[in-house]
Amino acid sequence: MRISFKIVSILAATLYSASALAGPFDGVYRQTANSDCSLIGVDGGSLEIRGGIFYGVEMECRMTRPVDVINMDAILYTMQCIGESDQWAERALLMNSAEDDDIIMLWDGYAFRYERCDPAE
């Protein structure tokens, strides 16, 4: 059985594009210790990062122009955000926690630590 080069190329491109969409911080994170992981983007719920988009409370931000931070497990993004009929852009730094599976997110003047939700929740 012979597989054509065209089919192999299409499969490889599909697998590459699917993996390119997944980011290093993809997941669901608690806003507070008692946040409901099944509710995304509402007060009392959780936040989600998926495919280069940060879903916050009644807003979402495209995570663009990633810059690796040298000697740190961190990436600086330009966040192109929309929410409540407003648009804005800001820079945000995301990094993995050194101690566990949490992430740390820094906006200008603000720092947040988000605990990753268990996938079974």
Image (spheres, rainbow, N blue to C red):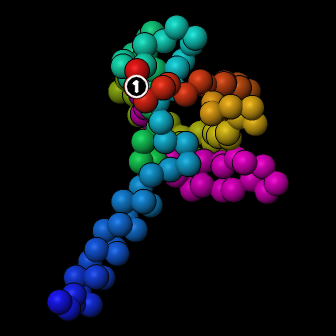
Q: Residue at x 70, y 47 (%)?
A: 74
Query: Magenta stretch containing residue 68, yes or no?
Result: yes
Query: Magenta stretch containing residue 18, yes or no?
Result: no
| Span colored in magenta | 54-77
The answer to whether residue 55 is left or right of residue 98 is left
Q: Quadrant of residue 20?
A: bottom left
Q: Residue at x 34, y 75 (%)?
A: 12
Is residue 24 shown above or below 115? Answer: below
Q: Secondary structure at mark 1?
A: loop
Is residue 58 shown above or below 25? Answer: above
> Is residue 58 among what the camera can see?
no
Q: Which residue is mark 1?
A: 120
Q: Position of residue 5 (x, y in %)?
A: 26, 90
Quadrant of the rendering where the N terminus is positioned: bottom left
Q: Residue at x 41, y 48 (%)?
A: 51
Q: Quadrant of residue 79?
A: top right
The answer to whether residue 120 is left or right of residue 89 is left
Q: Main secondary structure of the magenta part?
A: strand
* Mark 1 residue crowding within 10 angstroms, few (<14) / some (14–19) / many (20+): few
> Is residue 6 among what the camera can see?
yes
Q: Position of residue 94 (x, y in %)?
A: 65, 40
Q: Residue at x 31, y 68 (%)?
A: 14
